[in-house]
Image (tube, grey):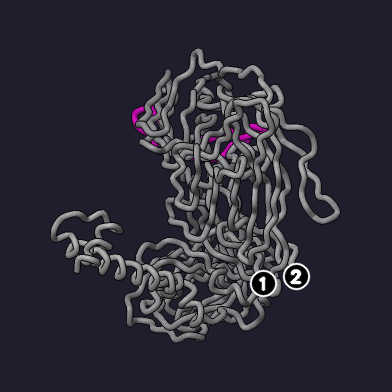
Amino acid sequence: MKIVSCCVSTVFGVSSRNGWLVGLARIVTFIILKTSILALLLIPPVIPVSAQRFISPLDFPLQLSGGFGDLRANHFHAGIDFRTKSSEGHPIHAVLDGYISRVSVSPGGYGLAVYVTHPADKFVTVHGHLQRFSPILSEIVKGKQYENESFSVNITFNEGEIPVKQGEIIGFSGNSGGSSGPHLHFEVRDLGTNDWLDPLTIYKSHIIDTQKPQFRGLVIYPIEGKGTVNGSANKQNIELRYDKNGHPTVIGAIKAWGEIGIGIRAIDRMNGTNFSYGIKDILMTADSVEMFRSAIDRISQDESKYINSYTDYIEWSYNRSFIIKTFVAPGNNARFVASRNAGKIIINEERIYNAVITLTDHYDNVCRLPVKIQGVKQVIAQPDTVGTTLLRWYDYNAFSARGIRLTCPRYSLYDNINVRYNAYSEEKYESPVHTLHTSPVPLHYPAHLSIYVDSSLKAENTNQYGIVELTYPNYRRSWIGGVYRDGWIDTEINELGVYTVVRDTTPPKITPINPAGWSRKKKIDIRITDNLSGIASFRGEIDGAYVLFEYDSKNSMLNYTYDEGRLQPGRHQLKLIVTDRCGNQAELLLDI
């Protein structure tokens, strides 16, 4: 016992008379913990275990047209897009046992979509942009549409109401909603958290990919007031080229001083397609120290909007081009991003700093870009903040001037900004043009904006007034809307920019498409458009009874297919009323 006690005391630092008992307990605990940790390491992640049971939702080999986490306007792509041979009408199968938990129809977004809950596997799968539902779902949806007298519906079901077996057909592929071409949008969600999970983890073995990710550009950012690059306080686009072995290299010298950040333009490729995809993993090191890493495999709905900080928002707004920043704003709390010193490199010695950016895809195809930064002392310009108002990213912010009020909730900004407010008048607008920021600044949570309109307008139709954002490059009017209140128009905005008030008095336009052929085709096609505020609602009637027009908002098309159960042969009168967001109405009366 003394020998054991001595050994235990030596290993665990136990020196009391009964220390051997304490030490023995610690040894046992250590063995149990080590065994438990080993056991945990042997348990694969949740999705790969269940991936063995998943089947393909399609009847033909899988190809992707869009990947999980791909960069999109104001959001990360929440699923993967399966190609459907550039055509519609292919059967979509349930990938696991479960039950239909939701069916939705929308003129935009996912269009016709089916949600299947899989309780045993703790997942929800989503199937979007369908052409049509399975017969049982089609009957339910059409009944609800007529009951609500609305094309758009959202129907939920409890477990046990509509069970489905793996392989059962739940719908048919299409191009509905915000789709830009025939495909199946497919999502896997965590049943407990509703987080989006990467479905390619499941279907990785179905797809061959031997192609490396590609760098398309490099951008060096001087941190405002703290850094400079090649003698400038502005971001610097650095040219790249690929050598004969396919390795990217930097062209020209990068001379910097102070704090800088790095941005990249990059895409991924896959075998057999010309589509480009987002980057799965990004690693940036400086002098062999890991400074930034992003690995997008799970995204919550709140995190999706962090794309506006993860990328260069101004570059997207002005040029519709994505630059991924490997430095992190203080208000970016995305879980898939990790950094040291917020990813910023401090250049404070006159020497060469060696940064390396590594791109990796699902299949461990890797592309590396070495970036040499030469430390050269330079004057660091300080921003002109005279006459500006500081808004802090972590704080509740309020700003007001004559005829404008702005309140931003806490954490709505990603970084501190200095607002240089300006206002001017133009006859074509109903209020002054208010500049909250010369370039657009994204907001993670909407801000409340109020703009005053002339008091003489109070007696008029106040529904016709709304706030618009004047956007780059030609001050194009982007309708925001709002509610009139005591001389003010109140609304919510998602970015700081340039705003004013306009009046929309023009009703929508209704254009019948080849009405002479409707009876022969047994289908009515009508285009509906609006000049400013946008279509709010429409209602179709035949002989005074509601009829269901389907709405494809991306093509501005309404169509009604003759329903023999509701429409008897013979002559009828069609009535269509279309209303915009300001209450302006257009009406079509036509004998058919």
The magenta segment = 468-488
**Residue 484 spot, x, y in % from top left:** 39, 34
Residue bearing the label numbered 1? 63
Dot 2, how many residues are within 10 Å of its Cα: few (below 14), some (14-19), or many (20+)? few
User: What amino acid does circle 2 point to?
Assistant: Gly
Are discs 1 and 2 less than 8 Å apart at CB?
yes
Query: Given the current orientation, which residue lies at the most extreme right position?
Result: 244
Residue bearing the label numbered 2? 272
Residue at the location (50% across, 57% down)?
538
First along the sequence among labels 1 and 2: 1
| 263, 392: nearer the viewer | 263
Q: From this view, report whether residue 574 is shown above or below residue 48.
A: above
Helix, strand or loop at label 1? It is loop
Whether residue 94 is visible, yes or no, is no
Residue at the location (74% across, 67% down)?
273
* Viewport quadrant of the N terminus: bottom left
Residue at the location (54% across, 82% down)?
55
Tell me the CA gap for discs 1 and 2. 8 Å
Q: From this view, report whether residue 480 is shown above or below residue 190.
A: above
Q: In which image quadrant can residue 381 be found?
A: top right
| Residue 462, numbered label | none
Residue at the location (80% across, 55% down)?
246
| 40, 129: nearer the viewer | 40
In the image, 422: left or right of 381? left
**Residue 205 spot, x, y in % from top left:** 61, 76
